[in-house]
Amino acid sequence: MKSLKKTSTGLPHTEMTLPFVLLAVGLLSGCQLEPTTAKSVLELPPITGFPLPTIASPPDTVEEVQPKLAGIATREFVIAKDRGIVGGLAGISVQDGDTLPDIARHFGLGYNDITLANPAIFPWTPEAGARVMLPLRFILPDAPRKGIVLNLANMRMFYYPPKQPGAVFTYPVGIGREGWNTPLGQTTIVAKTVNPAWTVPDSIRREHAEKGDPLPAVVRPGPDNPLGKYALRLGFNSYLIHGTNKPYGVGMQVSHGCVRLYPEDIEVLFKKVSAGTPVRIIHQPYMTSWDGDMLYLEAHEPLQKWAGQKKPQQKSLLKQLRQTAAEKGVTVDWDKVDRILQRADGIPTPILSASTDLPELVAQAPEVQHPEHFYGQPAVPELTDSDLVLIVADFANEVTAQQLVAMLNHQGPSIPARQVEKNGSYQVIAGPFKNKKEAGSVAHRIKIDFEIDAKLGMVTIQ
C-alpha cells in the first residue's frame, strides 16, 4: 500500500461546502467587449476585440476527433419526414471514477442536459452501479431548418447541412452568463480562424485584475487560450462560436457572451460550415412535436434574462395545445403537462391521455455499454518518490474530498489531483509538477478559482 507524507507545514482540517458545479470563475472565458443588449445584424461589422482572421481548414482528421459509439446516435441524426423530433433516450451504469460531466461529454451532452435528467445523482461523485439516463432525444426548434439554429433556452445548437437534406447535427454549447448574455437574432458566419489569438477586451482585463488574476493584452494560441483551436466569427460585433480550453463549462452560462463548444465538436463543425452560413439565435423554452400519432412536450426553465416571460409563454403554450387537441380530436393529459413544466428537465415526454410517463420511458431506455475510457476524461499521472506537489486541503469527509479532486481534474487546463487517506482524514493533493514555478502557477489558479491556499510539499512513497 502506498502512502504519502508531506514535508511542508501541516494544514488544518477544512470543512467546506463545495457547489455541485465547477466554480464559475474557473470556467469563465469570452470575447465580447462590453455587456450589450440583443441586436440582429447581417452586415459585416468592424473587427474589434480580436485580430484579423486567418482563413484555413483544419487537419483532415475530423472523423477521429469524436468518440466512436455503437448502436446509439449522439450528434448526427436523421430527421424523419414530417417529424420535428430526433434521437432517443438511453442509459448507462456508473463505474468507479466516473463523473456525470465525463459521461455527458462522451455522449454529446452538456452539463445542463445530464444533471437535469439525473437530479438524484451527485455530478462529481456518482455512486458505482447507479444508472444514468442519457437524454439524447431532442425536439427541433421552431425555426427554419437552414444553417445554424442556436436555442439558448436549452443551450443547444442545431446545424442543418445544405448537402445533407434530412440530417441535423446537434451540439451542446456554453453561453453568456447573466449580464453578458449571448444576443438573440439573425446573423451569419463571416470568417473562420484556425488557432486564433485572443486580444483581451479591456472590460475583461479589468474584471480579472480586480480578482487578482491579471491577463495579458493578447493570449496566443495554446492551452491557456480560452478560444481553443477553432473560431467562427459572427456578424454580431465581437461574438464568436469557438472551442474552449475549459470543456466542462459546456452546458453552463459562463462565457462573456460567445458560444463555446467541446473541442471535438467545434473541429467537426468548423470543417462543415463555410463563411456566409446563416445563424439564428433564439430562446424557446417550450417546444412541441408530433412523433407518429403521439404529441410530445419538451420544457426548459427560461434563462434569467427572460424569466419575466415565463408565465406568458406558458399561457401561450397551453392555448396552442388546446387548439391542437381540438383540431386533431385528441385528449391532452393536462396534469402531465403541468408536471413537465414543473420538471423543466428538457426531456421530450408524450402528453396525450394514457401515454407513457417519464419513469416508464426511463425504464424502457436501452442500456449503453460502458466504454473503457470516456472521451476527453482527465488522466491523472502516477506520483513517484520526492515528487513536487501541492497540498490543497484536508477533509474529514471523504465525499467532499472526492468532489474537490474531481473539480480540480476537470479544470481547464486540468489540474491533476487525487485524495489520500491520512490519520483519519482525506487529503487532496495536486501534482506532480516539474518545478516550483509550475506549482506556484497552479497554486495561484486554485486560489483564484476556489479561494483555497494550497501549500507546496513533496511526497514520500512507502
Image (tube, helix red, strand yellow):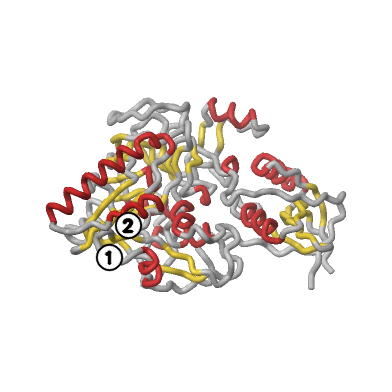
Q: Name the residue beneath numbered marker 2.
A: 336
* Between 431 and 328, the one nearer to me in the picture: 328
Residue 342 x, y percent position in the rendering: 39, 50
Q: Secondary structure at mark 1?
A: loop
385 to the left or right of 131: right
The quarter of the picture where the C terminus appears is bottom right
| Residue type beneath disc 2 | Lys
272 to the left or right of 446: left
**Callout 2–callout 1 Cβ contact below 8 Å:** yes
Above or below residue 198? Residue 273 is below
Write down the quadrant of residue 425 in the picture: bottom right
Q: Which mark is residue 401?
A: none
Q: Secondary structure at mark 2?
A: helix
Residue 389 visible to the viewer: yes
* Between 40 and 332, the one nearer to me in the picture: 332
Residue at horizontal 64%, vertical 49%?
18
Q: Name the residue beneath numbered marker 1.
A: 355
